[in-house]
Image (cartoon, helix red, strand yellow):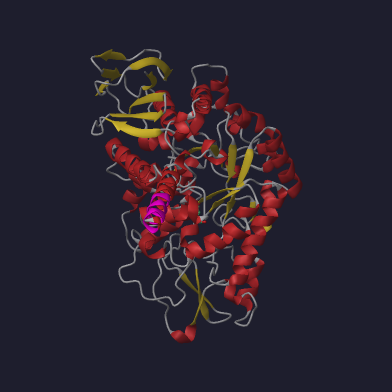
Amino acid sequence: MIKKTIQLVTIIWMMGMLHAQAQLNKNYSKQRKWWKEAVVYQLYPRSFKDSDGDGVGDLKGITEKLNYLKSLGVDVVWLNPIYSSPNDDNGYDISDYRNIMKEFGTMKDFDQMLEGMHERGMRLVMDLVVNHSSDEHEWFRQARSSRDSKYRNYYHWWPEEKGTPPYRYSLFDVNHDAWKYDTLTRSYYLHYFSRKQPDLNWSNPDLRKEVYDIMKFWADKGVDGFRMDAFQFCVKDTSFPVFEGLNASNFVQFYAMVPPIHDYLQEMHKEVYAKYNLMSVAEGAGRNMQDAHDLVDTQRKELNMAYAFDAVDVSSSPDYSMLKLKKTFTKWDKEFQNDGWLSIFMGNHDQSRVIDRIGNPSEQYREASAKLISTFLLTMRGTPYIYNGDEIGMTNAGFKDISEFKDIQTINEYKYQQSQGGDLAAFMQKNIKYSRDNSRTPFQWNDGDNAGFSTSQPWIRVGNSYKEINLQNQENNPESCVNYFRQMVKFRKDNKVLVYGDYTVVDENNPNIYAYTRIEGNHKLLVVLNFSDVTSQVTIPKAMRVSTVEINNLPTKPTITNNTIALLPWQAVIYKLN
Ligand code: GLC
């Protein structure tokens, strides 16, 4: 009898424990964290503000504009790379990880900028580029000099006597070939990106330690997090097997998340992240949902949030539709509703301007659609990332000729197409719309010379729209894109339901209107967005009771008849629900 009772008590206790654990698991996405509540502003230093008149943006320029950043209400600034670099890929080829690129200023300028951010309650996230270094980095200079160099094993080499290495696709190479023959040591080295970006060898513990030391160097200076560039590709199977069928459109399936990448991330977490209060996000989220979860699920102690490409890929495909975008966001939200955390973004320095992909850049709808996009990004579950210039609704540059482009990817792909007898007219058409140079043009501060970015000719020409779209025009207009953006950031801050609340899509198959609720306890909001040039309707469930209009990007209130809401073209409205 006693034995039976003890058994029963044990079973009940175990069930209780399992239930408690299950509850805990269920609530991971509700756990409060500063990096979940943050709004991230991505700043492209080369094109933000030039303080010394050389046509290139710099750190002092950023410091001059800190009050502007503060006025937006953003919490975190993510800076694209500012380290020493020969600039083959605009700073993504680093020759010294502990120094500042000459064109951008000095370490003193950096310290002042960081202090200025912290004084204003903003945090700084640095881009950490460690899938590859520059070929001008001291490690590579040494590694290349002799097969016996102590740094040889920091990179991947294939000795000539083994024959031609198994094909690897390169994203930026003029021949799409990731192996480059180096005469001095009669070996090939691996470069997934450009020839000047040799891939680092993560299976070497000495290299990993160097990276952790670099991270600690910046964390000790006070930076608040890292965005880890191309990190999903950093581990290679160093036996270099043949990849049957590898090509430009499927390389992620072969390159991403190669074991033991998660062991290295856990090691990095233990060595660096656990010791500081840092935010961490890696570019790319692997090949599938499981990969993404493995990167960011709470108990795994790897990274804070995933940065998945599916949605931007949908937006830059020729058969884009809002319905596809909606399905993509909804699928990802569902996957991460219990654990893990997502970045919410539609623009960055590798994409053309967001308004040209999912909005309408015409004069008639530019402002409304820019505001709608801000509403969207700031009301989804996940940490929103806003790319500089999108808050004022900057549009694509308007480049026409290949000579106007500066980006290595665009230029080398052009050369590749040329060498293959490809359709150059089609290539140009595609790149005029989608080249990443479109979002790398100078920030449009005013309608004066060089859009107020610099006193001399900028490194890349100013976008065509600067006379109409610029900050100065917008500052004093309460109805402008930038002031709407400020209002939306504040609204997100005041309504934590937008961070932690459940997301449920309404009228899922509506092709024009993207509508969803965000609900946590008694806090209930309905977001309704008309992603189209025509007045459109959405019918909400009978039981849903809308009360006040909290946000509206147009002066006219939508009409509601029997739970059917009619929205004007590109109208965005947020209702409180009873
Ligand atoms: C990432 C960066 C991109 C860069 C590449 C190589 O994709 O976002 O700008 O060219 O990595 O570092």
Q: Residue furthest right?
A: 108
Q: 572 or 354: nearer the eye?
A: 572
Is 4 contained in the magenta span? yes
Residue 258 lies in magenta, yes or no?
no
Read off the magenta span.
3-13
- Looking at the rendered image, the quarter that the C terminus falls into is top left
Residue 441 appears anywhere in the view: yes
Relative to 510, residue 210 above or below: below
Left or right: where 173 falls relative to 445: left
Residue 140 in view here: no
Observer-nearest of 397 and 144 = 144
Q: Position of residue 424 (x, y in %)?
A: 34, 53
In-front residue for pair 73/441 = 73
Position of residue 388 measured from the top left corner of the image (x, y, whole percent): 53, 36
x and y, in percent, of residue 130 in the image: 56, 60
Q: 28 left or right of 563? A: right
Above or below, 333 against 466 in this view is below
Quadrant of the rendering where the N terminus is positioned: bottom left
Determine the residue positioned at 46% across, 59% down.
232
Residue 180: horizontal and vertical position, in percent?
Answer: 49, 72
Residue sitting at 53 percent across and 35 percent down? Answer: 37
**Residue 24 versus residue 385: which sits nearer the camera?**
24
> What residue appears at the point 33 percent right and 44 percent down from the top-left corner?
314
